[in-house]
Image (tube, rainbow, N blue to C red):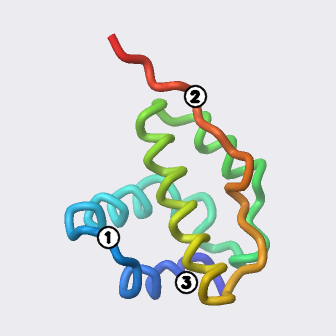
Amino acid sequence: MLVNEWVETVWNVIQIRPKTLHDYRRLYKRHVMPVIGSMPVNNVDVVILQQKLLSLPPQTARHCLMLVKSIYLEAKLYKVANINPTDGLRTAPIQIS
């Protein structure tokens, strides 16, 4: 199963507020889907994902990482994936001015 296929299921089962779901869909379509959407769920390249996160502003990267973690939390729960490519990934600290 491809990440894009799984994500369509996630949108229907994930228990989050409507505003959060709206934000997740927007982030996925803009930042995550072009990078990992066509990869099989169990074959997401961690290096490519990390490179994408590093290319984003820190707050956007943090939100994208939280999104991908949520996608894989559901994937493991539903036995769709046996790995989580976000394990150990971090984003740059958010600078508060």
**Amino acid carrying mark 1 in the image:** Ile
Verify CB contact (< 8 Å) between mark 3 and mark 2.
no
Q: Residue drawn 53% across and 70% down? A: 71
Q: Could you give the CA–CA distance between mark 1 and mark 3, rounded to whole angstroms? A: 17 Å
Q: Residue drawn 72% across and 60% down? A: 85
**Amino acid carrying mark 3 in the image:** Trp
**Disc nearer the start of the sequence (3/2):** 3
Callout 2: SS: loop
Verify CB contact (< 8 Å) between mark 1 and mark 2.
no
Q: How crowded is mark 3: few (under 14 residues within 10 Å), some or many (20 or more)?
A: some
Residue 90 location (% of width, % of height): 64, 39
Q: Could you give the CA–CA distance between mark 3 and mark 2, rounded to whole angstroms? A: 28 Å
**Residue 16 — which label?**
1
Q: Is residue 97 left or right of residue 44?
A: left
Residue 21 location (% of width, % of height): 30, 68
Closest to the observer, 69 or 54: 69
Callout 3: SS: helix
Q: Mark 3 points at which residue?
A: 6
**Amino acid carrying mark 2 in the image:** Ala
**Disc nearer the start of the sequence (1/2):** 1
Q: Residue drawn 71% across and 78% down? A: 40
Residue 26 location (% of width, % of height): 33, 60
The image quadrant where one finds the N terminus is bottom right
Q: In this view, does 25 lie to the left or right of 44?
A: left
Camera-near label (1 vs 3) is: 1
Q: Residue drawn 66% across and 79% down? A: 76
Q: Name the residue under label 2.
A: 92
Residue 14 location (% of width, % of height): 40, 78
**Disc nearer the start of the sequence (1/3):** 3
Q: Is residue 78 above or below residue 62?
A: below
Q: Could you give the CA–CA distance between mark 1 and mark 2, rounded to whole angstroms? A: 25 Å
Q: How crowded is mark 2: few (under 14 residues within 10 Å), some or many (20 or more)?
A: few
